[in-house]
Image: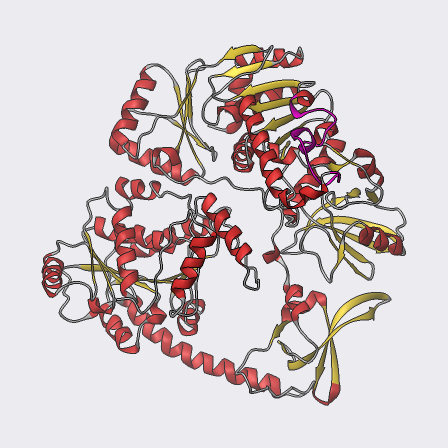
Amino acid sequence: MKIGDLITKYADNLVIKAITGMIKGKRQLRLKGIAGSFDSLLLSAVFQDIGGIHLVILHDKEEAAYFQNDLQNFLRHSHVLFPSSYKKPYHYEEVENANILQRAEVLNSLNEKHELIIITYPEVLSEKVINKRSLISNTFSVSAGERLDLDFLNDFLLTYDFEETDFVYEPGQFSIRGGIIDIYSYAHEHPYRIELLGGEVETIREFDVSSQLSIQQQNKINLIPNVQAKLVSEERQSFLDYIPDDTTIWIKDYEQTLDIIDRSFQKVEEQFQSIKALSGSSTLITSPKQLFETSESFSENISTFLNIEFGNRFYLKAQEELSLAVRPQPNFHKNFTLLADNLRELQHNHYDKIIAAESFKQIDRLKTIFEEVDSEIAFDGLNASLRAGFIDDDAGLCVYTDHQIFDRFHRYRGKEKFTKSKALTLKELKTLQPGDFVVHIDYGVGRFAGLDTVDVNGSRQEAVRLVYRDDDLLYVSLHALHKISKYSGKEGNPPSINKLGSPDWGNKKKKVRKKVKDIAKDLIKLYAKRKAAKGYAFPEDDYLQAELESSFIYQDTPDQSIATAEVKADMEQGHPMDRLVCGDVGFGKTEVAIRAAFKAVNSGKQVAVLVPTTILAMQHHRTFTSRLENMPVSVDYINRFKTSKQVSEIKKKIKEGKIDILIGTHRIVNKDIEFKDLGLMIIDEEQKFGVSVKEKLKNMRIDVDALTLTATPIPRTLHFSLMGARDLSIISTPPPNRRPVTTEVHSFNEEIIRDTISRELRRGGQVFMVHNRVSDIEQIGNLIYKLVPDARIGIAHGQME
């Protein structure tokens, strides 16, 4: 089923028609009996019918993000999240640049669009925004064909909080290179490139930050200033005053929202305790009315608009009430018998049955499972990432989510605006200092001498200046930056600088190519023997494999799916697999290994998992056991903590085939460990093993499939893979919404330690505090006790027994 078909089904629904009729009649309405993601489906159907501006007020930032994620499935466009400007609530020194971009986008959209859904939460409404008059008067328009004064544009951008850089990679930056101007406005997803010809705007193009390729051409653009910056003589206003009078406001649980506002006010009071002496100052907030910075209190202000409330708790005076018959999705806890019974009952009662999953592959896996469990049960697959399923008894419809069926973790996908990691090599160029060694692929080693502006056919362009032997100069255009790299070699041994026009650099490259070819010949012979060796061809996936992969508690990343498919395809070949899976910590390499191991065991083979440390063996044993607990698989591990009796028992079981997966350190490559029928060897972090262990591995895996996992491959291993001697899978996609690591450096400060630990504990997290001396570590523990008396504290160090 397609998303559009689901919304169309509800567009003709009598309940929806009744709701839209009440909205058009400006009547206040309270909705009861809503569950799961039905609220976002309901809003989508209403919005498609009547359009207009809709403001959705949810309880907090996370709830708003999940709701927007649902709307992203139903309505690809026409909805925006309006977030707070700050990283932490009411901490006004830590601004979130991505949020300022989204706020500016909303304000700009309200000026340009007449149909829009804005999703927000109470904390945001307490923050004033730039007023309409200032936004319009401080917005600068550029049109194709008009004359553009570069000096005026430069002054305008600097005045309104833009930063001049060599190139742009995040909102609020601009770059002027001759007749080319790159500007990343605060209210648009992509930056603009303006090209001038004789002082006139020739073209305006939207371009991608990472590739620098054009996305689409524009005739006119509006450059929006930083809406968070304090503009000169500018009065700010409440966002509630900003939206049109005929806006439809949807509030989730009106009373609870007001409670959250009261709690927010208490937080603000706490933040301002230190400046109570300034009670006469406008910086001190003395009532919730001031918190929401509007001419009326929050509840009075929004009551001037049409209010629609949805949720489980309801109270709002003088409203009409409409009850819906929508139930939440039942809990099945991976039990397919329960799920089949439930779907069979719904099928008997003529309900439409839909299972939503983020990928078509997951839907196919579910269908494979049901072909085995009960082939008479039919359902439609919906390619959508919904936060929760529901059953609508009035409409005769059930929409279930795959992550709830399998008890999988579900995380919203934030709308990606920009990321600093997308910056080009120009960003690295900024870190170079004059005098640093660089290598040009055509001319060899030289010294970096900064950037310069050169004349090319009458046009001024920026170029990199390189100095070679005898002070010869080479200018390299910014468009040829891919030919330059920073020199890396042995520390303390400066390289010899090449001479421009000399054959030395060319001869050096020829010698290296010859050596590489010689090494490659030897390696190809070695790996050709391995490819020619006869291995076991594993059969194709069955329903048990589909059930295991579907039950993964996280959504597969694209790279993870590709790596899994490549590993399984190799295992199904007639020659032994030799694949390297390379990916950062936490990117999902172990899950790929578990799926490969289960495929081997499911075909009657045994698996050896070799890890470098004792602790990692125990950790992998816990992970493998947890993932395979509902499968007919026996997992065990061997390390130095096992007694002689336990080791003897494991050796006996391995030889008899009673253990399917054995995890261990280099102990498992000893000759006394005999596998009954080894089919797959998984090696984790191969670079941490010694030469003798690697020689034993070579003998073990001549005709056995080998899968190597690593986050940091040694150059030799990686080189084998890159030149095709070993197969390579790279998992470079991080899990959805993975938070970047934040690093701050402070001098020792008890207040900072107290606040940081308290904030993390309130969040429900844990804190590790690393100290550099065992002798006084107890004193540090006592200090934490004094600063955070309600914390449970444990102390550990390397000198403990």
Q: Inspect this view and state whether residue 237 appears.
A: yes
Question: Taking 257 as reference, is 743 above or below it?
Answer: below
* Residue 655 location, quadrant: bottom left
Question: Taking 785 as reference, is 426 above or below it?
Answer: below
Where is residue 145? Give x, y as percent.
87, 46
Which residue sits at x=54%, y=81%? 489
Which residue sits at x=82%, y=51%? 159
Which span of residues is magenta-colored?
Answer: 280-299
Left or right: 425, with 570 as reference point: right
Q: In this view of the protein, which residue sits in the foreground, 85 or 607?
A: 85
Task: Describe the colour scheme in one phrase.
Answer: secondary structure
Q: In this view of the protein, which residue sits in the foreground, 748 or 717?
A: 748
Where is residue 611? Give x, y as percent.
29, 64
Of helix, strand and loop, which mostly describes the magenta segment? Answer: loop
Where is residue 455? Give x, y as percent.
84, 70
Q: In this view of the protein, which residue sits in the foreground, 499 or 647?
A: 647
Q: Residue furthest front?
A: 277
Q: Residue furthest bottom?
A: 470
Q: Quadrant of the C terminus?
A: bottom left
Left or right: 800, with 674 as reference point: right
Q: In this view of the protein, which residue sits in the foreground, 40 or 444?
A: 40
* Residue 519 location, quadrant: bottom left
